[in-house]
Image: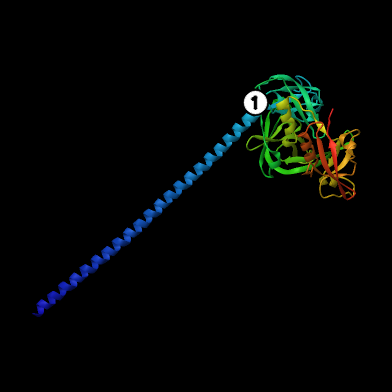
């Protein structure tokens, strides 16, 4: 009996040990399965992360390539509208020429209508009714007639007798922002370097600069400042935004500093361009004044100060302004209810009118505001 109990006890112990072993084995299997699952998840996660990174990198590369392609296509298109302008036919074709670029009047222009109207600088084309020579992207050279020129803003329009030309798209220079990417296109040095493209950003807007010309002090206002490289032959060429729209016409570089160049806002000439495109002519209305804004005061030795409007510095003889009683020292606050902050504001508004149109000006004179009416004349 005792032997039987002993054997039974041994069997129970053995059975318990087997049970414990099985439980331990199951636990180990569960632990191993969990560890394997976690490792697999990590590997899958790493693979997914790697795939995502690769996908994002690929997308970024594709985007950069697409952007480069878009910029390249844009520059290719705008280049077809860029022309060379010279005052001397078949001259300046070599950078080793003894003749100076300035003597040749070598510069750049941009086609703005399909029937041959071209925008450039006045100092490139010459005065109204003068002649110049225009070389297209095809290499062909044509006689050009200067149909409009304004030395006050250094802008001009040249006409060639050609049809179905590719034209540049004009942007809105009133809505540009500092920091925007821009491209300057032109013919620096000589025709060997025609349609050279430089890039940069808009560094500042509404700049005023002072320089001397023919022993006279000249002020240029409302300029776009850029760090895109502009050289003498670039004058008259387009300053283009990232969408391929012309927002300015390259005009000058500060030679005493690097990375400071300027362009004239295209909006200053839009009304002129539209008139030539629609009517084949532009009868320029004029008030007959020169005025400057408060930013010019920093260049002048004067105690004059004003917070709004534009200061009348010159009143031309027998002009509409003189006949209306406008005087030197008047501050023009508004024209037909439109506030004025820059001479460009006044000029652009007048360019939207015609000779013979009447305008109303609000003027501050001796701390008193008055209104005068004037009839615009035709600029000869």
Relative placement, left or right, of 318 versus 139 is: right
The one of 326 and 108 positioned closer to us in this rendering: 326
Measuring from the top left, give residue 153's x and y in whole percent: 80, 35
Q: Is residue 59 above or below residue 3?
A: above
Crowding near the residue tagged with mark 1, few <14, some 14–19, many ≥20 C-alpha atoms within 10 Å: some
State the residue lying farthest toward the bottom. Answer: 2
Relative placement, left or right, of 292 versus 243 is: right
Color encoding of the figure: rainbow
Quadrant of the image for the C terminus? top right
Residue 66, quarter of picture: top right
Q: Is residue 88 above or below residue 199?
A: above
| Circle 1 residue | 166
Quadrant of the image for the N terminus? bottom left
State the residue lying farthest toward the left. Answer: 1
Residue at x 85%, y 37% (from the top left corner): 374
Measuring from the top left, give residue 332's x and y in whole percent: 84, 44
Measuring from the top left, give residue 263's x and y in whole percent: 74, 37
Residue at x 85%, y 39% (from the top left corner): 373
Query: Tag count in the figure?
Result: 1
Measuring from the top left, give residue 368's x and y in whole percent: 88, 49
Residue 181, quarter of picture: top right
Mark 1 secondary-structure assignment: loop
Residue 355, quarter of picture: top right
Residue 101 visible, this orientation: no
Residue 300 visible, this orientation: yes
């Amino acid at each position: 009996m005792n032997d039987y109990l002993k054997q039974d006890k041994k069997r129970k112990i053995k059975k318990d040990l087997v049970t414990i072993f099985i439980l331990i084995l199951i636990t180990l299997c569960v632990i191993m399965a969990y560890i394997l699952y976690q490792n697999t998840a990590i590997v899958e996660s790493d693979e997914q992360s790697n795939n995502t990174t690769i996908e994002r990198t690929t997308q970024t590369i594709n985007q950069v390539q697409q952007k480069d392609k878009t910029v390249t296509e844009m520059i290719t298109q705008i280049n077809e509208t860029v022309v060379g302008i010279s005052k001397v036919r078949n001259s300046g074709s070599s950078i080793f020429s003894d003749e100076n670029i300035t003597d040749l009047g070598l510069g750049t222009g941009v086609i703005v209508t399909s029937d041959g109207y071209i925008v450039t600088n006045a100092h490139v084309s010459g005065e109204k009714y003068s002649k110049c020579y225009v070389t297209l992207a095809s290499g062909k050279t044509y006689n050009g007639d200067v149909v409009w020129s304004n030395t006050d803003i250094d802008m001009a329009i040249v006409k060639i007798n050609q049809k179905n030309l590719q034209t540049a798209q004009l942007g809105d220079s009133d809505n540009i922002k500092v920091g925007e990417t821009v491209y300057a296109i032109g013919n620096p040095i000589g025709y060997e370097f025609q349609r050279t493209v430089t890039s940069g950003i808009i560094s500042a807007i509404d700049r005023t600069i002072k320089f001397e010309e023919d022993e006279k002090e000249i002020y240029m206002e409302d300029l776009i400042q850029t760090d895109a490289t502009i050289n003498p032959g670039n004058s008259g060429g387009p300053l283009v935004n990232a969408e391929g729209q012309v927002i300015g016409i390259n005009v000058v570089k500060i030679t005493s500093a690097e990375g400071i160049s300027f362009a004239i806002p295209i909006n200053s000439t839009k009304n002129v361009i539209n008139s030539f495109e629609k009517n084949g002519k532009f009868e320029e209305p004029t008030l007959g004044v020169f005025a400057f804004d408060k930013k010019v005061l920093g260049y002048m030795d004067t105690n004059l100060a004003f917070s709004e409007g534009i200061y009348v510095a010159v009143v031309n003889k027998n002009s509409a302004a003189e006949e209306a009683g406008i005087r030197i020292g008047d501050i023009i606050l508004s024209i037909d209810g439109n506030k004025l902050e820059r001479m460009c504001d006044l000029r652009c508004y007048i360019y939207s009118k015609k000779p013979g149109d009447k305008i109303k000006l609000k003027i501050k004179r001796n701390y008193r505001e008055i209104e005068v009416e004037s009839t615009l004349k035709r600029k000869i």
